[in-house]
Amino acid sequence: MDNALNQQLQLLVEEIKQYSANDCSTTIRVRRRIALNKFVNAVVNSGRLCKQTQWSGLPNYEDYHNEALQLTLMEICKKIDEYNPQYPVMVWVNKIFHWRFIDVVNKERKKGITKIPKGEKISPVLSLDDINKEINTEKSISHQEIVKTIIYKDPEKYLVSQHLRGHSEANLQAILILLLEGKKWKEISQALGVPLTTASSFYQRRMHKIIDYLKKYI
């Protein structure tokens, strides 16, 4: 199946190359665009696009995936004439896809949404386990249980007070409790009635304040 797919894609690449990107003829440009569209559709529907599962733990994974894919498709269209037929088409495509995914995640890191220390490998955003590690002291009591108790009691009502504008129910306490219950971000967004990216970004931007707040009661 992979050989048949590769042959199909390489034929489409050859068709594209028949129409020079530098040709001023409107007819040639239209034919090249049609051929490029056929190629892109074949790639997207091939079932051989890498899912980039190493980043599936990121709360904004689907958004990152879609953005990286769009960047990849634009790049392969731009660089299609540079493709070396000695290598399978999807190997070339997925290599570009991999680097564009890294670009997207790094861009979000600079915004402070994903907490990726400079020089370290990309990893999922901070979770409740990370909070436990951040506030861990040398006490023998289960810090995880202490953290849970503080979240539920919210002594200063800080967690409840921090909520999305116009959605008081979508507050930090509610998000943390849902995370404690093992809910995924898709489930959390549905439970709170807000977009997944909005909820996860709101949570991540306040992560260090959450840690400082919990530390006061350890």
Image (tube, rainbow, N blue to C red):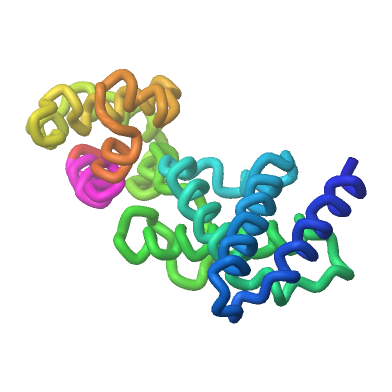
Q: How far from the left and from the top, in percent, is residue 81?
A: 70, 74
Whether residue 155 appears in this view of the structure is no
Whether residue 9 appears in this view of the structure is yes
Q: Give whichever of 144, 35 is nearer the camera.
A: 35
Q: How far from the left and from the top, in percent, is residue 19?
A: 69, 70
- The quarter of the image holding the N terminus is top right
Relative side of 150 to 91, left or right: left
Q: Give whichever of 139, 90 is nearer the camera.
A: 90
Q: Quadrant of residue 192?
A: top left
Q: In which quarter of the image is residue 128?
A: top left
Q: How far from the left and from the top, in percent, is residue 111?
A: 30, 62
Which residue is at a point 57% across and 58% down the rendered structure image? Answer: 73
Is residue 187 located in the magenta-colored stretch of the structure? no
Region in magenta: 203-216
Q: Give whichever of 30, 53 is nearer the camera.
A: 30
Which residue is at a point 27% across and 47% down the rendered structure image? Answer: 207
Relative side of 68 to 149, left or right: right
Q: Quadrant of residue 86?
A: bottom right
Which residue is at a point 68% across and 40% down the rendered structure image? Answer: 45
Relative side of 13 to 177, left or right: right
| Total marks placed | 0
- The quarter of the image holding the C terminus is top left
Q: Determine whether 17 is above or below 214 in the image.
A: below
Which residue is at a point 38% across and 54% down the rendered structure image? Answer: 114
**Magenta segment, prevailing SS (helix, strand or loop):** helix
Q: How far from the left and from the top, in percent, is residue 211?
A: 26, 46
Q: Determine whether 108 is above or below 24 in the image.
A: above
